[in-house]
Image (cartoon, rainbow, N blue to C red):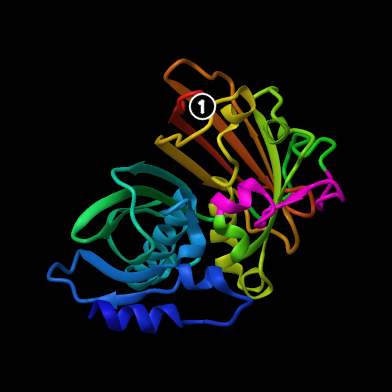
Amino acid sequence: MTAELTVDLGQAGGVDDAPFSRVCALAELPSNDPGIGRFAGVIEPTWTIGKKLHGGTMVAGSAAAATEWLRRTAPGHAAMFPIAASTDFLGAPDPGVVEYEVRTRKIGRQICLIDASLIQNDRTLVHTAFTFSHLDDTTPAYTADHAGDMPAEPPADALAYDDDNPMGKIVHVAQGSSAAIDTQWARFLTGEKSEPRLRLWIRPRPGDEQDPDVAAYFAMMAADMSPPVPMNLGHFGWAPTVQLTTYLRRRPAPGWLRVIAHSREVGGRMFDEDQLVIDSTGALVAQSRQLALVPQAQ
């Protein structure tokens, strides 16, 4: 069954302009418990940091499974979408076939709660508690100036994620999207030190951008797209996420997404990192906050 799923899902929507759609493609698996849904998916090596799967991509894949389960089991709530996700990483999955096990904790008039576990080789490696509700499609009563002086598209001096960029050699998402980092903030790229803050741009491929669900899952993924901000302080290496919380406010407009990351404190053991995702219209689309371990300084 695993080999068949690799072929079937790996080719689902397998056109070059919709690689993230394949992250969100699911095949239902049999379940011995009617209260538990089981789905198979494939997360390709494109969506890796180094050799391991990117955390935000796994949150997005889990969100797709939880949404499918809610739509199947509570069709009256099919218009709801995951607006919050609380994720714990129990292990580091490899690219390839993954299984999602989902169950309902609450069905309410305004709020539904769904738990999703990402399983590989019979081990639960990522667990996410999702809160579902209706996305915010009204004009905000108040909104801050989220983007500041950050342009809506990468300027000429932005550094694209490609093989000529040290980030592109480690972060492989540019094989499935367009991405660039702001060199004015990423001082670590030239060996300098600066504040723990970073900015970048990311845009899905046309096929992914045109699917409203996939575009929303992509925005959730983008909320975990910034490199660890302690890099600007000279701390390089793996920064394991202790806990990640992601909010989805609204569906993104077509175009580039701007990602702005800050830290309030980089300690000796841990640091926090907040990320904002802003679409081409300047609207706040997604947010995240994570607590992570500080990598060893070099």
Left or right, 154 with reference to 8: right
Amino acid on which disc 1 is placed: Asp
Q: Residue at x 37, y 83 (%)?
A: 7
Q: Residue at x 18, y 60 (%)?
A: 122
198 lies above or below 52: above
Expressed as whole percent of the image width and height from the top left, the position of residue 251 reads: 63, 58
Q: Residues within 10 Å of mark 1 (few under 14, many from 20)?
A: many
The quadrant holding residue 144 is: top right
Q: So how many labels did they put on this image?
A: 1
Magenta stretch encompasses residue 133: no
Q: Residue at x 55, y 72 (%)?
A: 19
Magenta stretch encompasses residue 158: yes
Expressed as whole percent of the image width and height from the top left, the position of residue 52 reads: 41, 52
Name the main secondary structure of what is drawn in magenta: loop
Which residue appears farthest toward the left when viewing the image? 32
Left or right, 64 with reference to 178: left
Expressed as whole percent of the image width and height from the top left, the position of residue 17 reads: 64, 76
Expressed as whole percent of the image width and height from the top left, the position of residue 71 reads: 40, 70
Q: Quadrant of the N terminus?
A: bottom left
Over which residues does the magenta segment extend?
151-171
What residue is pinned by disc 1?
Answer: 272
Q: Residue at x 61, y 78 (%)?
A: 16
Which residue appears farthest toward the top when viewing the image? 268
Q: Secondary structure at mark 1?
A: strand
Of 173 and 253, the residue lying toward us = 173
